[in-house]
Amino acid sequence: MKTVIYFFSGTGNSLAVAKKICTVLRDCEIVPVSSFMNSPGRITPTAERVGIVCPVYFSGLPLMVAEWAARLDIPDIKYLFAVVTLGGSGGGPALRQLDEIIKKQTGRGLDAGFSVKMPGNYIFMYKSPEGQKRDLLIAAADRQVDEILPVIQCCERKSISRAVIGSLLKTVIYPWFSSRARARARQFSVTPACTSCGTCARVCPAENIELQDGKPVWKDRCEVCCACIHLCPVQAIEGGRKTEGRPRYRHPAISTGELESRNMGKT
């Protein structure tokens, strides 16, 4: 059965999960959600099984993923699944948001939804785990994906969990996030350590960064994926005083170069 997996990833967690699933399914293609950003119209997958893998932001979806999902046209696919990666909680509400968006557009929702706990990267609020703590989280995530794989391979249905507290929390924090996300880039700044390498612009899935006089300038469509601040090779990007001295994070199985090429729509 042919499978296509659409992913959104800032620092590699969701891409790592998408790649692991795709390797096992074999006849599988991985496509970045960002590759549709500048192409209007409906999106019709040419596969029988479709997967969506993305992170959870404040108990909901990245804005780009929510907008992309509203364009999906999937009347003929046999199986639709989603995996959300998260550093904290909110997997259920994010999956339900995705399910509701797709159902509204196509009349059918997700056949299965899964949450995978991974190291968080929201550097504005906390330090990303390092060393053994990071490695243990990634090992546990790999085991979770191993448990998910047979369900996806057999196209089994799996209902999305419903938690009242989680749903209530999303109604408060996700509107706050979504109303401020695009402007979050105003908090980024570059230090004199910048070497004008352009990594920040190349890893940004929203094409929100351009170099002016060799230095990054952020525009107004930030996704808050934090790729730029985490993947700068000399840590020359900060997001205010809170990020100073905080460790940077990238999934160890995903290189910066791969994130650059994948986010530019290359395989």
Image: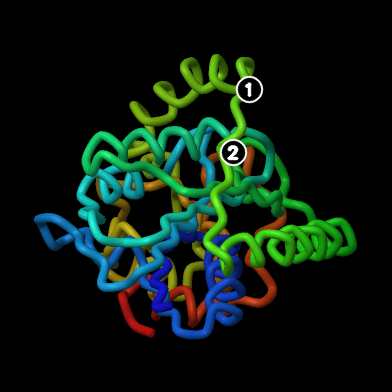
Q: Residues within 10 Å of mark 2 (few under 14, many from 20)?
A: many
SS category of the residue bearing label 1: loop
**Along the horizontal axis of the image, is 166 left or right of 7?**
right
Residue type pointed to by label 2: Gly
Q: Position of residue 1 (x, y in %)?
A: 43, 78
Residue at image location 62% in from the left, 60% down from the top: 151
Front-most of residues 228 and 212: 228
Residue at image location 58% in from the left, 66% down from the top: 154
Q: Position of residue 229 (x, y in %)?
A: 52, 57
Quadrant showing the C terminus: bottom left
**Along the horizontal axis of the image, is 18 left or right of 204?**
right
Q: Is residue 122 above or below residue 165?
A: below
Q: Is residue 172 above or below residue 139?
A: above
Q: Of all residues shown, which one is farthest toward the right?
A: 132
Residue type pointed to by label 1: Ala
Q: Is residue 234 visible?
A: no
Q: Is residue 225 above or below residue 66?
A: below
Front-most of residues 46 and 237: 46
Location of residue 77 by image quarter? bottom left
Q: Position of residue 211 (x, y in %)?
A: 29, 67
Q: CA distance from mark 1 to mark 2?
A: 10 Å
Q: Residues within 10 Å of mark 1 (few under 14, many from 20)?
A: few
Q: Which residue does the numbered mark 1 point to in the structure image? A: 163
Q: Which residue does the numbered mark 2 point to in the structure image? A: 91
Q: Is residue 152 visible?
A: yes
N-terminal of the pair, mark 1 or mark 2, is 2
Q: Position of residue 99 (x, y in %)?
A: 40, 39
